[in-house]
Amino acid sequence: MNTSPLHSIRSGDEKAFEHLFKAQYPILCGYARKYLDDTDQAEEIVQEMFFSFWQKKEKLEINISLEAYLFRSVRNSCLNYLKHLKIREQYKLANNQEIRRKEQEVHDNVAMTTINRWIIHKIE
């Protein structure tokens, strides 16, 4: 009979899952902090990973050790988060450039309107 922690968790054993969570959570949070340098975000990523792990427990195909799987999952989640931050920062930069361009356009239009009015006033 297979009584590995993964087998127990796949069977819905909440105690086995809780034991795994309590044993691995602090270690995985420390590991995530090495990527993120943000304690709160590291904890959130590890919590989300465990939540997802529990949700998909019956369907998981783990061909490596459970510990290695957890570390890889946290690493991938951290890298995805960092990638998302980079994309968000690039969008923010592009958006700020567009805002400055539009502000300059408005400024130019106001200046041109003022000059045109001045010219028309001088001609009349």
Image (tube, rainbow, N blue to C red):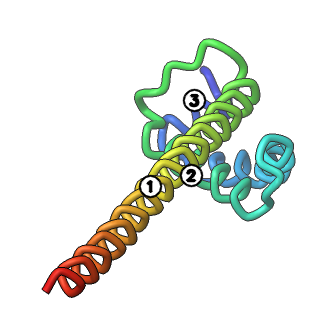
Locate residue 124, reporting x and y percent. Answer: 13, 86
Mark 2 vs mark 1: which is more N-terminal?
Answer: 2
Mark nearest the camera among 1 and 3 is 1
Locate residue 69, reporting x and y percent. Answer: 67, 26
Mark nearest the camera among 3 and 2 is 2
Q: Is residue 58 left or right of residue 112?
A: right
The secondary element bearing badge 1 is classed as helix
Q: Quadrant of residue 18?
A: bottom right
What residue is pinned by disc 3? 7
Find the residue positioned furthest to the left.
124
Instruction: Look at the image and tell me in which quarter the N terminus lies.
Output: top right
Marks 2/1: CA–CA distance:
30 Å
Badge 2: few (under 14), some or many (20 or more) residues near its Cα, within 10 Å? Answer: some
Mark 3 vs mark 2: which is more N-terminal?
Answer: 3
Q: Quadrant of residue 118?
A: bottom left
Front in this rendered view, residue 117 or 40: 117
Badge 1: few (under 14), some or many (20 or more) residues near its Cα, within 10 Å? Answer: few
Locate residue 93, reporting x and y percent. Answer: 54, 51
What residue is pinned by disc 2? 48
Mark 1 vs mark 3: which is more N-terminal?
Answer: 3
What residue is pinned by disc 1? 95
